Amino acid sequence: MAVPSWPSGIPYESLKDGFSNSPFLTPIQTEMEQGNVRLRRRPGDNVAIIQQSIPMTRAEYETLVAWGKGTIGNWTGRFSTLVWLGSSYQTKVCQFQDGAPKPLEFSPTHVAAQMTLRVYGV
């Protein structure tokens, strides 16, 4: 099945102040009887968690909400988009970590859509 793309005409560029990147999931720790700690990889170790805020008009935000509810099944499906990875934008498969982006008042005509993404293949 094809992975849908971020809706065209909706900005994807994050505000510099609204961006953070956790480059990998923390390993699973298991304490051993001898007092040592064993670190194990997690399934999906190539997943980064990115928090970002994207400025957009209120109309663009409503378009994003309609896309999230319909195209990706109430914000649960995967999609491809350009994501800032610290030095450049790269096309990656993503998934919303915490559901729909939260709109924060940015100006009378714009909101900043705050979101947390699981970014695969980093």
Image (cartoon, grey):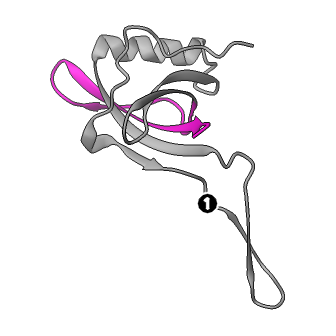
Q: Quadrant of residue 109?
A: top left
Mark 1: few, some, or many residues within 10 Å (few <14, many ≥20)?
Answer: few
- The residue shown at (44%, 30%) is 83
- The residue shown at (39%, 14%) is 62
- The residue shown at (76%, 89%) is 35
Q: Is residue 101 magenta?
A: yes
Q: Nearer the viewer, residue 103 or 48?
A: 48
Above or below residue 87? Residue 40 is below
Q: How far across and how far down the image is residue 88, in percent?
A: 38, 33
Q: Nearer the viewer, residue 4 or 39?
A: 39
Above or below residue 96? Residue 7 is above
23 left or right, relative to 51: right
2 left or right, relative to 20: right
Q: Is residue 39 magenta?
A: no
Residue at the extreme front: 87
**Quarter of the N terminus within the rendering:** top right
Above or below residue 5? Residue 17 is below
For disc 1, the marked residue is: 26
Span of residues in magenta? 94-122
Q: Nearer the viewer, residue 116 or 24?
A: 24
Q: How far across and how far down the image is residue 70, in percent?
A: 59, 12
Classify mark 1: helix, strand or loop.
loop
- The residue shown at (34%, 18%) is 11
Q: Main secondary structure of the magenta part?
A: strand
Q: Quadrant of residue 18?
A: top left
